[in-house]
Amino acid sequence: MPPLLHRLSQPVTAPIRRWVLGAFPRGQSGIEYDHPQGDPGWFGPHSVTWRVHSEFPGMLAGGLCALMLQTLHPLALAGVYDHSNFRDDLVGRLRRTTAFVAGTTYAPSAEVDALVAKVTRIHAQVRGHSADGRAYSADDPALLTWVHVTEAYGFLQGCRRYCREVPGAVADQYYREYKRVAEALGATQVPASEAEVDAYFARQLPQLRFDARSREVLGVLSGIRLPVPMAGLSRELVLGAGAALLPDWAEAMLERTAMQRAQARTSARVLRAMTPLFRRALQDGLAPRACARMGLPASVLAEWPPP
């Protein structure tokens, strides 16, 4: 950014930067992003994944969309309901998920291997029975696929809605690339294109439910208080922007009212307008650091890679 434009934008971008770093502090994950030099990690600077995941507004809204979708799967929800401290530390849970996604995207290969191994060990300990008595385990390949698809869908739609145009071929490449993490965790039959994701969701519909547990988790989410200025307004903005990404079938299943949908559309417009400011405020994030590790300027991520 030219020095003059940087100075002129400071009064707006500085509060945004404080907001982001207050909600998601840096340096707490213990992940090494800067060394070894030349290590591309699992995806590298020529991947679509590096580009999609570099867009903070899309990732934030997309992650919240994924959480809303995940509340509809009784077995996936049971693991969170029974084994997570989401009621007392939802912010912490969101930060840990964010750290995993960021690490598997941008960290060097050895760091990614360690992250995946750690989460695999945690999953092996999470098992029990759902509210209707069915057994579940967090390392069930089908549940791992559900969690991955909802996240990948949310991240892609967040990028497309709030950050930049995503052509169909690029979207398909993203799904092909990013399923590597899901498969490493144990997921199987992971969709690898937009058409396959749509078909996957259609197959899942008969087992999805919006029940008392779904309502409770969404109630906790709707009351989340991020440690940032204007916490209530911030919450309504990001949750609304996340809800705006939901597929039509999910909006209907979640019983979202006409007023909630209108509020989500307003939040979506606001977040879209703010995206350039987020980019200016976060020019030293993990994507630029990973590019520097590869000896490349962060500007390479501004364009989609050639097919």
Image (cartoon, rainbow, N blue to C red):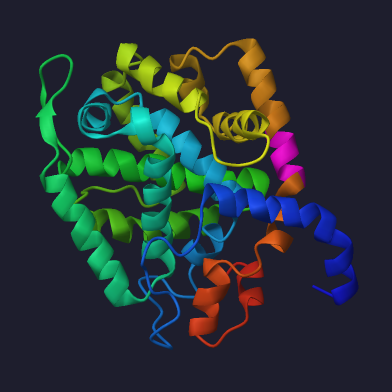
Count of all numbered marks drawn on residues in the image: 0
In magenta segment, residue 269: yes
Residue 30 vs 109, above or below: the answer is: above
- Nearest to the observer: residue 292 or residue 145: 292
Q: Quarter-wise, where is residue 28 in the image?
A: bottom left
- Is residue 306 visible in the rendered image? The answer is no
Residue sitting at x 54%, y 58%: 52
Residue 223 vs 230, above or below: the answer is: above
* Quadrant (top left, top right, bottom left, bottom right) of the N terminus: bottom right
- Nearest to the observer: residue 304 or residue 103: 103
Residue 228 vs 98, above or below: the answer is: above
Residue 55 at x, y = what percent?
A: 59, 56
- Is residue 295 visible in the rendered image? The answer is yes
Q: Main secondary structure of the magenta part?
A: helix
Q: Quarter-wise, where is residue 178 in the image?
A: bottom left
In magenta segment, residue 141: no
Left or right of residue 15, residue 200 in this image: left
**Region rendered in magenta:** 268-273
Residue sitting at x 66%, y 68%: 283
Residue 64 at x, y = what percent?
A: 49, 37
Q: Quarter-wise, where is residue 102 in the image?
A: bottom left
Residue sitting at x 85%, y 75%: 2
Residue sitting at x 83%, y 55%: 11
Residue 276 at x, y = what percent?
A: 75, 55
Residue 292 at x, y = what percent?
A: 54, 82
Residue 47 vs 230, above or below: the answer is: below
